């Protein structure tokens, strides 16, 4: 959906062709922000047709001051997006201020540090990612669209409706690769499923060309264990919401991660979780909502998973607690409001914020 530059105060570039966690964040946030008074628009290739987006040709208008503000905002989330923003602001002298959101869980390279130092504001998606930043920053954790990720609503949301064997499902979603720890999940399932006949394991996610050998070895291992009918690959999901609702337990065994939204999506679907301590997982999973284990520690991961498989009634209760936790701590409204305050502060400090007064923004709690 094309939006003009006149209708845009903030530009959110997305310069990656393949779908990623950053892309998911942008797709989730922008419609919500616009619906609540923030005039933000995406820019980039291969964006969903219904996502408000700018034409590339509109960038020429950034030399002009917008009607009600001294400048527009460029909200980058990747190095290449910071580079383009710096070039437009400092070389082309376009009327822009730059914001960067960092989800990285590692020390930045010197060039990245140089880019970050040139931002007007910096946001970290967790305390952990913020610990790697050497500039002032604000921690704003991701939220979840609670209208999209919901508890089971109909019979179609039950695992029984899927037609797959078993009474309970344990799932692992995301790209099939070493970094995501898919092999750790498979190894745990090979050991556990023979002892828990009511459970079935579901693996969902894209297998890229680079990781086809890795995926094939996993499937061969499953076949050798004679568990191909109980550890099931269902491919990439365009909309995983229903499958989250069908699970009793979700496992996120990543070896490393940026932020990692999938445990929050699962908890919002009333599903208990077992995660590694990669990314922001440890900051998302509260007591009584699931279990966090050290990354790359397969025996400890397996033991944590087994507790829930051995106690399905307790697992369901944990899922209910997880739902309440996400609803109170991670609604999308909280993230959108906090980011909106960062935008507002930049305009306030410029002495002109007529177009972005907080009282003019109708933030509504999606839970009500």
Image (tube, grey):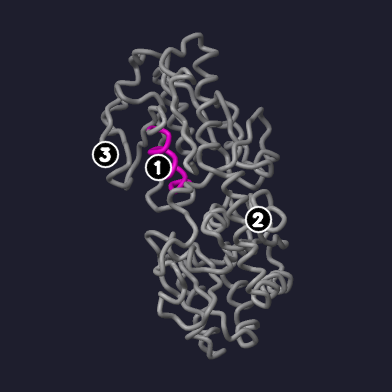
The stretch in magenta equals 22-34
Residue at image position (52%, 55%) is 265
Residue 18 among those drawn in magenta: no
Pointer 2: what residue?
A: 278
Residue most extreme to the top = 351
Pointer 3: what residue?
A: 1
Q: Earlier in the sequence, mark 1 or mark 2?
A: 1
Pointer 1: what residue?
A: 15
Q: Is residue 22 left or right of residue 288?
A: left
Q: Earlier in the sequence, mark 2 or mark 3?
A: 3
Q: Is residue 47 left or right of residue 160?
A: left
Look at the numbered disc 1 and give the secondary structure of its residue: loop
Residue 57 appears in which quarter of the rendering? top left
Depth check, mark 1 against mark 2: the one in front is 2
**Horizontal and vertical percent position of residue 365:** 49, 37
Q: Earlier in the sequence, mark 1 or mark 3?
A: 3
Q: How many marks?
A: 3
Vertical side of 129 occupied by 54: above or below: above
**Horizontal and vertical percent position of residue 2:** 26, 35
Q: Residues within 10 Å of mark 2 (few under 14, many from 20)?
A: many
> Magenta-highlighted stretch: main secondary structure?
helix
Residue at image position (51%, 12%) is 350
């Amino acid at each position: 959906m094309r939006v003009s530059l006149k209708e845009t105060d903030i530009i959110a570039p997305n310069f990656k062709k393949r779908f990623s966690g950053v892309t998911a964040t942008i797709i989730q946030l922008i419609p919500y922000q616009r619906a609540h008074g923030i005039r933000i628009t995406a820019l980039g290739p291969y964006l969903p047709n219904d996502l408000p987006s700018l034409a590339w040709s509109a960038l020429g208008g950034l030399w002009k001051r917008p009607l009600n503000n001294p400048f527009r905002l460029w909200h980058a989330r990747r190095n290449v997006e910071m580079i383009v923003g710096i070039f437009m602001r400092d070389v082309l002298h376009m009327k822009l201020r730059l914001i960067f959101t960092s989800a990285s869980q590692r020390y930045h390279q010197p060039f990245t540090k140089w880019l970050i130092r040139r931002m007007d504001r910096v946001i970290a998606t967790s305390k952990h990612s913020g610990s790697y930043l050497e500039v002032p920053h604000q921690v704003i954790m991701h939220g979840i669209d609670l209208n999209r990720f919901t508890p089971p609503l109909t019979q179609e949301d039950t695992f029984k409706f899927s037609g797959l064997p078993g009474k309970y499902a344990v799932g692992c979603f995301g790209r099939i690769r070493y970094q995501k720890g898919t092999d750790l999940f498979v190894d745990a399932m090979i050991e556990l499923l023979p002892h828990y006949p009511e459970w079935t394991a579901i693996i969902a996610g894209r297998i890229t060309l680079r990781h086809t050998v890795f995926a094939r070895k996993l499937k061969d291992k499953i076949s050798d264990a004679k568990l191909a009918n109980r550890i099931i690959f269902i491919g990439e999901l365009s909309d995983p919401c229903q499958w989250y609702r069908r699970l009793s337990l979700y496992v996120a065994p990543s070896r490393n991660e940026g932020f990692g939204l999938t445990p929050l999506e699962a908890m919002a679907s009333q599903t208990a979780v077992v995660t590694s301590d990669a990314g922001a997982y440890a900051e998302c999973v509260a007591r009584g909502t699931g279990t966090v284990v050290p990354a790359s520690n397969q025996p400890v991961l397996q033991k944590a998973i087994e507790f829930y498989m051995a106690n399905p009634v307790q697992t369901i209760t944990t899922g209910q607690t997880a739902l309440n936790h996400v609803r109170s701590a991670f609604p999308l409204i909280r993230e959108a409001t906090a980011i909106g305050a960062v935008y507002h502060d930049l305009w306030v400090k410029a002495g002109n914020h007529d177009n972005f007064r907080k009282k003019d923004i109708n933030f509504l709690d999606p839970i009500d």
